[in-house]
Image (spheres, grey):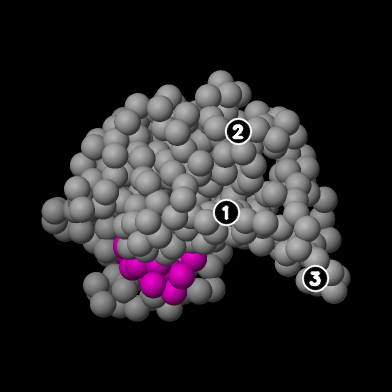
Amino acid sequence: MKITAYEVREDEKRYLETEAEKNGVEVTLVGEPLTLDNIGLAEGSCGITILGESRMDEKLLQEAAKLRISVVATRTIGYDHIDLNAAKNNGIHICNGYYDPDGVAEYTVMLMLMALRNYKQALYRANANDYSLSGLMGKELRNLTVGIIGTGKIGCKVARILKGFGCEILAYSRRQNADESLGITYCTLPKLYRKSDVLTLHIPLSNQTRRMIDKEAIRQMKDGVVLINCARGELMCVDDVIAGIESKKIGALGLDVIEDEEGIYHQDLRSDILINRNMAYIRQFPNVTMTQHMAFYTGEAVKSMAESGIKNIVSCMNRLENPNMLC
């Protein structure tokens, strides 16, 4: 059995190779994202594994089918970069990756605390030997209401961490299946917007959720609301979010992701010009903290992601039960 892995980072290599050896399969490692130009490298493979930069559209999936590739396993949890209908039409199974929710959940709460305590401005001042306090007064999380949109594994883990701070926790989710011990109160989305001091997103990107945080949603929120997004950048309409910051409707913003981040995040662009104007503009606000899509990035998660890329393909080819198979 042969597998070709695309978008392989240096930190993944040993895990991919070790897992392949454990399962008795041959693995070819390719550093670049999968495209029509390099899909030929996967000839003879039964499956390929990718990350989020590989856009598996209908044309690419058709080419994969011509090469008799049976499985595409993304090493990410999100799979909005894959056309599932086209995959099904071409007889290709799709699997997503797995890692424990702890890393992203902890990072989410960290961004909340950084926003509430004006960490960005405090850091900037200290770097210039300015140790003044004016404008840096923060808020205590225990006195706030946090709204969680989406109570899947990550959303529930965020709630479990927040419970220790003593804050009120509201949630809106398609499935209201959170453990009662988490102290979550489910409500409608308009009520969540109206009542929350802090809002955090933990839902997948779909046609229904794309740009759900728009002008109308922001209008319903509290003045000075803090928004956190460690899920997908396209869940927010960046133009409307910028308008909310400029009008001071939004009090602070913590972003690990942003719309149109592809080709920018996870790259060294120190000598280049950013082609994403909104990204270049929004990051200059004193109340906006941005990081480079790294909430997932722990040693534990990288190991799990790499291993899942191999395991999922082997499971599908051996017709074993696979909870990560999407189609």
Please state the horizontal and vertical placement of residue 294, each as a whole percent of the image: 54, 61
* Residue depicted at 37% across the width and 56% down the height: 166
C-alpha span from label 2 to label 1: 15 Å
Q: Earlier in the sequence, mark 2 or mark 1?
A: 1
Determine the image quadrant of residue 158. Answer: bottom left
For label 1, count other residues whose C-alpha is less than 10 Å away and answer few (under 14), some (14-19) or many (20+).
few
Give the x, y percent position of residue 20: 32, 72
Q: Residue furthest left?
A: 320
- CA separation in Å, label 3 and label 1: 19 Å
| Identity of the residue drawn at 45% across and 33% down | 195
Up/down of 259 relative to 137, above or below: above
> Which residue has dot 3 on it?
131
The answer to whether residue 181 is magenta is: no
Count the labels in the image: 3
* Side of 70 where 4 appears, left or right: right
Secondary structure type for disc 2: loop
Assign the C terminus to one quadrant of the image: top left
Which residue appears farthest toward the top when viewing the image?
A: 216
| Amino acid type of the residue that numbered disc 1 sits on in the rendered structure | Lys
Residue drawn at 50 percent across, 50 percent down: 230
The region drawn magenta spans: 297-310
Q: Secondary structure at mark 3?
A: loop
Which SS class for mark 1? loop
Determine which residue is flagged by label 1: 139
Q: Is residue 300 part of the magenta span, yes or no?
A: yes
Quadrant (top left/top right/bottom left/bottom right) for the N terminus:
bottom left
Q: Who comes first in sequence, dot 3 or dot 2?
A: 3
- Check the image and report above or below for 260 versus 319: above
Amino acid type at image mark 3: Tyr
Residue tagged 2: 223
Whether residue 172 is visible here, answered yes or no, is yes
